[in-house]
Amino acid sequence: MALLAASNIKYDNIKAVFLINPAMRLRKRTARFAPAVALWHNLADKLIKDEGRHYFVSNRPENPHINYVRNPISGVRELIELIDVVSERLSTITMPVLIIQSSDDPVVHPEGSKRLHHKLGSSNKELAIFPYDRHGIIRGEGSDLVFARVLGFLDSKV
């Protein structure tokens, strides 16, 4: 969402953007089927009544007390559509950008952040890879290092 806002010309008061484990490429390859499955469900709902359809996919979050244990397929479809829209606009983003990525993030693939960094229109962009094996790196061990990196970036750019 931050990249979408940054690519929108009416938000010209945005001075810099930072992203932490941005969802530009999902780890689960089956997520690519979400748009087709969601479309099928919409059609089937109108044409037939079938109790066998699945509207959710199970999720094993790092923090089940604050994260969903099931994700709606339609939500995954919308995320993929957002990734596609944002990907087309990356070259228009010219303000400073910091991308922080876990090296072994189980949710989003680090290659998505590398591709994002490459396609940004900004000449003032940074990609910081942290040696973590979790997605939620703003909580728990090492989160102070992430916050320090973001603060250093904002102090130098804004």
Image: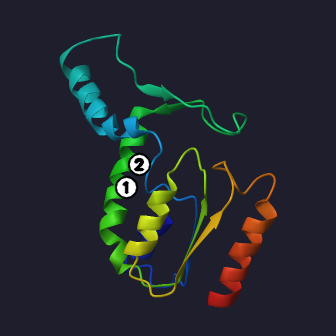
Kindly identify the residue that appears in the image at 44 percent across and 57 percent down. 24
Q: Nearer the viewer, residue 140 or 5?
A: 140
Kindly identify the residue that appears in the image at 47 percent across and 28 percent down. 57
Distance (Cα) linking label 1 and label 2: 5 Å
Kindly identify the residue that appears in the image at 66 percent across and 48 percent down. 134
Q: Is residue 108 above or below residue 122?
A: above
| Residue 6 rendering spot, x and y as whole percentages | 45, 75
Number of the label disc, if any, that sits on residue 13:
none
What's the residue type where badge 2 is placed? Leu
Mark 1, residue position: 82
| Residue 60 rendering spot, x and y as whole percentages | 61, 31
Q: Nearer the viewer, residue 71 or 146?
A: 146
Q: Residues within 10 Å of mark 1 (few under 14, many from 20)?
A: some
| Residue 128 rendering spot, x and y as whole percentages | 61, 71
Which image quarter is the C terminus in?
A: bottom right
**Outermost residue, left side:** 47
Labels 1 and 2 touching (C-beta < 8 A): yes
Number of the label disc, if any, that sits on residue 79:
2
Q: Regarding mark 2 in the picture, which secondary structure is present there?
A: helix
